Amino acid sequence: MGRFTRASALAAVVLSSITSTIASSPSIPTCGPGSPCPASAPCCSQYGQCGAGAYCLGGCDPLFSHDFSACVPAAVCKTEDYKLTSLDDVQAIDQYLGDYSSTNWVSSGQPTKYSSGQDQGILLTMAQDTVGTLLQSTHYVWYGKVSATLRTSQGAGVVTAFILMSDCKDEIDFEFIGVDINHAQSNFYSQGVTNYNNELNLTVSGDTVSEDHTYTVDWQPDKLTWIVDGKPMRTLNRADTWNATANRFDYPQTPSKIMLSLWPAGLPSDGEGTIAWSGGQIEWNSPYMSDGYYYALVKEVDVQCYDPPPEAQVSGSKSYVYTDASGTNNTIKIVDDVVVLKSLLASGDNPNFDPNASSSSSSQSTGSSSSGSSGSSGSSGSGSGSSSGSDSGSSSGSSSGSDGFDQGSGSSGSGSSGASGTLKGKEGRVVGGSALAVIVALGAMLIL
Ligand SMILES: *[C@@H]1O[C@H](CO)[C@@H](O)[C@H](O)[C@H]1NC(C)=O
Ligand SMILES: *[C@@H]1O[C@H](CO)[C@@H](O)[C@H](O)[C@H]1NC(C)=O
Ligand SMILES: *[C@@H]1O[C@H](CO)[C@@H](O)[C@H](O)[C@H]1NC(C)=O
Ligand SMILES: *[C@@H]1O[C@H](CO)[C@@H](O)[C@H](O)[C@H]1NC(C)=O
């Protein structure tokens, strides 16, 4: 099953559920090969929608954005061992403006602190009618050894994932389908091209649900190894991935974020292939749920950065940028640019744009604020990214059926973000279009 196919399918579902919820939704410009984003909504999100703000940060596809500078430069790799014992270092993705010096992780959905004896970690939760939870690094990795220690969820249609994904959709995966708790599915993609032969099941001793296991991606310029509990299980050599048609190695070679997620592949609205792959439709009264949600427990993520490849263009040390539409390793440049957006309607092209600031750069492209250009301004929620302290109570996180994503309407407690209860209703409505776009993006981002 190609991830891209699955992704698009669910993005469409999310979109239609929102569209029916909010009348008169603006049309969201889409982007992809041959159709880059317009200047008014310059950033192409991971799932093909144009916008600003959050769209220009993690996942912004430089190849289909308005220009290479629309996407905010990606923070370079940082070697660190993250013990995920609290949400202090996690910010809601729709509030993050790019200041990676103060935040190492961003989230959508409802991450929840978990603590029970020896077991400390962050729960990725998925309550009924939500699209689950995503935890994503603000720093990218451009070759490195990344390990995640986790326990997966369980049940038909429920997928736990630990992946590396680049902005032009190179991807390295560990995925865990909830009906097979004895294997990890390893996979990789090059620039999002679906290839049905790349998947390989790796046997995990014991099971993935009730015991901690450490899953490692050892990503080097010439070879990639999937490792389980310290034992190498699969190696991919770059030399074996030459694609004469594309005239490049179909080998992950661009800076990638770390993503941990729990997402629904078994919704009735998903494609048949997706549902079958994930073991069938999700049951929402399953014994595998607790407190109203499915959950996976992530305890630790250890990142060891490798040096950039010899052919890398290096003129700085802070961020990665793309210099060419081919999206190959030799077109990535390491520079010193750091861009923190002034508002959720700003972009890499216009980072100081802030409709709220009377003086500043108000002359520039004010039009973008009305173009449905995303921005996620509906998300003024100040919530600390969710109920900390316990694993209780997120079942309320997603009230009603099709309203699951309707954060922008200000109905308290709805939506997949734990912080959404603090939305200001009126403003949410005013910027409905923006909130809408963001929610689509957030929903879509979960669908790896
Ligand atoms: C991996 O295992 C799943 C179920 O456990 C199976 O459906 C799938 O075909 C397997 N994939 C491969 C490539 O063997
Ligand atoms: C980087 O790109 C160049 C040019 O396409 C290629 O020759 C080289 O093998 C690539 N190296 C890696 C590590 O992918
Ligand atoms: C080679 O690249 C082309 C163009 O991107 C793609 O359509 C094709 O599926 C690739 N081949 C394989 C075996 O992945
Ligand atoms: C403008 O200010 C309001 C109130 O502080 C805030 O909620 C909103 O997100 C801001 N708009 C943008 C585009 O940042």
Image (cartoon, grey):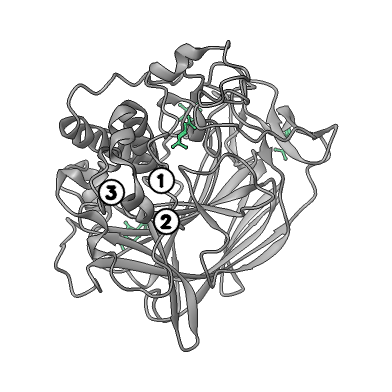
Q: State yes or no: discs 2 and 1 in contact (Cβ < 8 Å).
A: yes
Q: Is residue 310 above or below residue 49?
A: below
Toward the bottom, the furthest residue is: 117
Near-viewer residue (304 or 114)? 114
Label 2 beta carbon less than 8 Å to ligand 1: no
**In percent of the image, x 39 and y 42: which residue is there?**
442
Badge 1 element: loop
Near-viewer residue (161 or 336)? 336
Label 1 beta carbon less than 8 Å to ligand 1: no
Percent of width and height locating residue 120: 49, 78
Percent of width and height locating residue 82: 62, 66
Residue type at the position of mark 1: Leu
Residue under label 3: 415
Which of the two labelled residues, at mark 3 and mark 2, occupies the earlier sequence position? 2
Residue under label 1: 448
Which of the two labelled residues, at mark 3 and mark 1, occupies the earlier sequence position? 3
Alpha carbon distance from label 3 to label 1? 19 Å
Total label count? 3
Percent of width and height locating residue 24: 20, 21
**Crowding near pointer 3: few (<14 within 10 Å), some, many (20+)?**
many
Q: Is residue 8 visible?
A: no
Residue type at the position of mark 3: Gly
Residue type at the position of mark 2: Ser
Label 3 beta carbon less than 8 Å to ligand 4: no
Badge 3 element: loop
Q: Is residue 403 above or below residue 363?
A: below
**Crowding near pointer 1: few (<14 within 10 Å), some, many (20+)?**
many
- Compared across the picture, whether 238 is left or right of 365 comes to right
